[in-house]
Image (tube, rainbow, N blue to C red):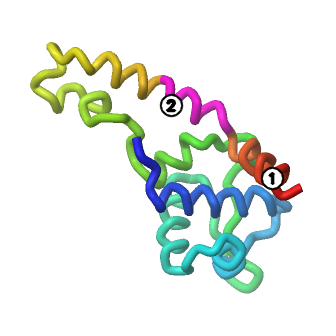
Amino acid sequence: MRITTKGCYGLRAMIELASQDGGHPLSMEMISDSRNISRKYLHALMTSLRSAGLVKSIRGPGGGYTLARSPKNINIKEILLALEGPLAPSSCSEEPSACERSNTCPMLGLWNRINDVTEKLLEGVTLEDVAQEENQLKS
Protein backbone atom coordinates (compact mmCIF):
# COMPACT_ATOMS: atom_id res chain seq x y z
CA MET A 1 0.00 0.00 0.00
CA ARG A 2 1.25 3.42 -0.94
CA ILE A 3 -0.52 6.58 0.15
CA THR A 4 -0.60 9.06 -2.72
CA THR A 5 -0.71 12.84 -2.63
CA LYS A 6 -4.48 12.53 -2.74
CA GLY A 7 -4.51 10.66 0.56
CA CYS A 8 -1.93 12.92 2.20
CA TYR A 9 -3.61 16.16 1.16
CA GLY A 10 -7.04 14.82 2.04
CA LEU A 11 -5.80 13.94 5.52
CA ARG A 12 -4.34 17.44 5.85
CA ALA A 13 -7.70 18.97 4.95
CA MET A 14 -9.51 16.70 7.41
CA ILE A 15 -7.03 17.61 10.17
CA GLU A 16 -7.72 21.28 9.46
CA LEU A 17 -11.46 20.68 9.86
CA ALA A 18 -10.86 18.69 13.04
CA SER A 19 -8.62 21.36 14.56
CA GLN A 20 -11.26 24.00 13.89
CA ASP A 21 -14.15 21.80 15.01
CA GLY A 22 -16.23 24.48 16.63
CA GLY A 23 -19.33 23.95 14.55
CA HIS A 24 -18.63 26.78 12.11
CA PRO A 25 -17.79 25.84 8.52
CA LEU A 26 -14.42 26.54 6.97
CA SER A 27 -14.33 27.93 3.46
CA MET A 28 -12.40 26.26 0.69
CA GLU A 29 -10.11 29.29 0.68
CA MET A 30 -9.38 28.98 4.41
CA ILE A 31 -8.53 25.28 4.15
CA SER A 32 -6.51 25.80 0.99
CA ASP A 33 -4.46 28.65 2.45
CA SER A 34 -3.94 27.01 5.82
CA ARG A 35 -2.83 23.64 4.43
CA ASN A 36 -1.16 24.83 1.23
CA ILE A 37 -3.39 22.82 -1.10
CA SER A 38 -4.54 24.25 -4.42
CA ARG A 39 -8.23 25.09 -4.47
CA LYS A 40 -8.84 22.98 -7.58
CA TYR A 41 -7.24 19.91 -5.99
CA LEU A 42 -8.96 20.57 -2.67
CA HIS A 43 -12.32 20.73 -4.42
CA ALA A 44 -11.80 17.23 -5.83
CA LEU A 45 -10.74 15.93 -2.41
CA MET A 46 -13.72 17.47 -0.64
CA THR A 47 -16.07 16.02 -3.26
CA SER A 48 -14.76 12.52 -2.48
CA LEU A 49 -14.92 13.10 1.27
CA ARG A 50 -18.47 14.47 1.01
CA SER A 51 -19.57 11.49 -1.09
CA ALA A 52 -18.17 9.18 1.61
CA GLY A 53 -20.19 11.00 4.26
CA LEU A 54 -17.14 12.34 6.09
CA VAL A 55 -17.71 16.05 5.51
CA LYS A 56 -20.74 18.25 4.97
CA SER A 57 -20.85 21.27 2.73
CA ILE A 58 -22.84 24.35 3.59
CA ARG A 59 -23.76 26.75 0.82
CA GLY A 60 -24.12 30.49 0.90
CA PRO A 61 -22.48 33.31 2.81
CA GLY A 62 -20.59 31.94 5.77
CA GLY A 63 -20.72 28.49 4.22
CA GLY A 64 -17.97 25.99 3.71
CA TYR A 65 -17.13 22.56 5.05
CA THR A 66 -17.52 20.87 8.41
CA LEU A 67 -16.92 17.34 9.59
CA ALA A 68 -19.99 15.13 9.29
CA ARG A 69 -19.16 13.52 12.65
CA SER A 70 -16.98 14.22 15.63
CA PRO A 71 -13.24 13.74 14.91
CA LYS A 72 -13.18 11.01 17.57
CA ASN A 73 -15.72 9.08 15.47
CA ILE A 74 -13.83 9.25 12.18
CA ASN A 75 -10.92 6.85 11.74
CA ILE A 76 -8.03 7.17 9.32
CA LYS A 77 -9.06 4.03 7.43
CA GLU A 78 -12.37 5.67 6.44
CA ILE A 79 -10.60 8.74 5.12
CA LEU A 80 -8.03 6.79 3.13
CA LEU A 81 -10.67 4.46 1.67
CA ALA A 82 -12.65 7.49 0.50
CA LEU A 83 -9.61 9.03 -1.15
CA GLU A 84 -7.43 6.10 -2.20
CA GLY A 85 -9.84 3.21 -2.64
CA PRO A 86 -8.87 -0.28 -1.43
CA LEU A 87 -5.83 -0.38 0.83
CA ALA A 88 -4.82 -3.98 0.13
CA PRO A 89 -1.12 -4.58 -0.55
CA SER A 90 -1.93 -6.63 -3.66
CA SER A 91 -4.94 -7.08 -5.91
CA CYS A 92 -5.21 -10.76 -4.96
CA SER A 93 -5.60 -9.98 -1.26
CA GLU A 94 -8.33 -7.52 -2.16
CA GLU A 95 -10.15 -9.95 -4.47
CA PRO A 96 -8.72 -13.51 -4.47
CA SER A 97 -11.06 -14.65 -7.24
CA ALA A 98 -9.35 -12.15 -9.58
CA CYS A 99 -6.21 -14.30 -9.52
CA GLU A 100 -6.20 -17.79 -10.98
CA ARG A 101 -3.34 -18.74 -8.64
CA SER A 102 -4.97 -17.69 -5.37
CA ASN A 103 -5.63 -21.30 -4.33
CA THR A 104 -1.96 -22.25 -4.68
CA CYS A 105 -0.16 -18.95 -4.05
CA PRO A 106 2.27 -19.11 -1.13
CA MET A 107 2.17 -15.31 -0.76
CA LEU A 108 -1.60 -14.87 -0.42
CA GLY A 109 -1.54 -15.62 3.31
CA LEU A 110 1.17 -13.02 3.85
CA TRP A 111 -0.68 -10.39 1.80
CA ASN A 112 -3.85 -11.09 3.78
CA ARG A 113 -2.03 -10.73 7.12
CA ILE A 114 -0.43 -7.46 6.00
CA ASN A 115 -3.85 -6.22 4.92
CA ASP A 116 -5.46 -7.23 8.23
CA VAL A 117 -2.76 -5.56 10.34
CA THR A 118 -2.86 -2.38 8.24
CA GLU A 119 -6.65 -2.12 8.42
CA LYS A 120 -6.73 -2.71 12.17
CA LEU A 121 -4.04 -0.08 12.72
CA LEU A 122 -5.84 2.52 10.59
CA GLU A 123 -9.19 1.73 12.24
CA GLY A 124 -7.61 2.31 15.65
CA VAL A 125 -6.36 5.82 14.88
CA THR A 126 -8.95 8.58 14.83
CA LEU A 127 -8.89 11.97 13.21
CA GLU A 128 -8.92 13.41 16.73
CA ASP A 129 -5.74 11.44 17.57
CA VAL A 130 -3.92 12.87 14.55
CA ALA A 131 -5.15 16.43 15.20
CA GLN A 132 -3.93 16.17 18.79
CA GLU A 133 -0.57 14.87 17.57
CA GLU A 134 -0.27 17.90 15.30
CA ASN A 135 -1.08 20.23 18.20
CA GLN A 136 1.64 18.60 20.31
CA LEU A 137 4.16 19.00 17.49
CA LYS A 138 3.31 22.72 17.23
CA SER A 139 3.87 23.25 20.97
Give the percent coordinates (x, y) of residue 110. 34, 19
User: Rounded to the nearest whole Å, what is the CA distance between mark 1 and mark 2?
Assistant: 25 Å
The vertical placement of 42 against 56, above or below, is: below
Looking at the rendered image, the disc whose residue lies closer to the viewer, 1 or 2, is 1
Part of the protein shown in magenta = 117-125
* Residue matched to label 1: 137
Mark 2 residue type: Glu
Mark 1 residue type: Leu
The residue under the point 51% across, 65% down is 45
Dot 1 or dot 2, earlier in sequence: 2
The vertical placement of 29 against 3, above or below, is: below
The residue under the point 50% across, 30% down is 118
**Where's the C terminus, which quadrant?**
bottom right
The residue under the point 63% across, 69% down is 57
* Residue matched to label 2: 119
The question of residue 136 being in magenta is answered with no
